[in-house]
Image (spheres, rainbow, N blue to C red):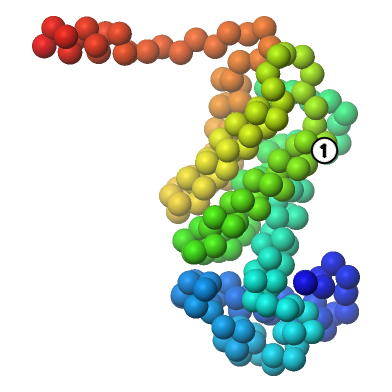
Amino acid sequence: MPQSAVKRDPRIVRSMTAMRSALLQLMSRKPFAAITITEIVGLAGYNRGTFYANYTTKEDLLEDMIGEKINDLLQSFRAPYAQVNEFSPHELHANSVMIFNHIARNADFYTILTKSDVLPALRKKMFASLKNILTEELSFEGGDVDQELMFIYSLNALLGLIFYWIESGYAHPPAYMQEQLVKILNHMPSPGKKLGVRTQAVSKNLHEKRG
């Protein structure tokens, strides 16, 4: 099991950082399943004894690497409400949304893992971690929508947007993504507000029938 949360000796921190970096480099070249511990320690400049002093398996190292990024992701997610007792998603300012800045700061990590065989594990971990803090830290008042279902819907939408951005090669800057997310939230109906969506379906069906 990773020891990063327990040991803070600078030498241990350096060795673990080097191994996380080595693993990421190797994952840019080959599937995680094909990577060996010997390759990891060789690239990191350490021996197997150092590896086993901190991890049991390469999966432990992967979990540690992902966990480090997830912790920072959660801090970025909390940014809009960390200093307030109550807030409305419909009143968010784009400059308070930090999650895209986090992704951009760690672009190599997210790009490599998104293209790797561990993408399902990464996405599952991100979803579970975000859902956990939503459930523990936020409570939506009013309305008759099932809160858990709303969380699931919202998180899948957010992660879909994030992974689309990553897969696009970060086609837009973080500030643009933040602005667009706020605009999307502002288009979602709040309690007592109806959202109208124009549709061309009826006219299209009539045109097809006439054709």
Secondary structure found at label 1 = helix
Q: What is the quadrant of residue 110 in the picture?
A: bottom right
Q: Nearer the viewer, residue 78 or 204?
A: 204
Question: Would you say 8 lies left or right of 189 here?
Answer: right
In the displayed structure, 107 sits above or below 174; it is: below
Question: Would you say 45 lies left or right of 32 here?
Answer: right
Q: Nearer the viewer, residue 56 or 21?
A: 56
In the displayed structure, 117 sits above or below 10; it is: above
Furthest toward the left, the residue is 211
Q: Position of residue 51 (x, y in %)?
A: 72, 84
Q: Can residue 77 be seen in the rendering of this structure?
A: no
Question: On the rendered image, what quadrant is the N terminus found in?
Answer: bottom right
Q: Position of residue 149 (x, y in %)?
A: 65, 28
Residue at x 67%, y 32% (from the top left corner): 151
In the displayed structure, 121 sits above or below 7; it is: above
Q: Nearer the viewer, residue 97 or 150?
A: 150
Residue at x 16%, y 9% (from the top left corner): 209
Question: Would you say 198 lies left or right of 66 here?
Answer: left
The residue under label 1 is which amino acid type? Glu
Q: Position of residue 89 (x, y in %)?
A: 70, 26
Crowd class of label 1 (few under 14; some 14 to 19; many from 20; radius 10 Å): few
Q: Position of residue 108 (x, y in %)?
A: 55, 63
Question: On the rendered image, what quadrant is the C terminus found in?
Answer: top left
How many numbered circles does the render carry? 1
Residue at x 67%, y 62% (from the top left corner): 66
Which residue is label 1 attached to?
136
Residue at x 61%, y 79% (from the top left corner): 22
Q: Nearer the viewer, residue 97 or 95?
A: 97
Q: Can residue 128 be seen in the rendering of this structure?
A: yes
Q: What is the quadrant of residue 180 in the picture?
A: top right
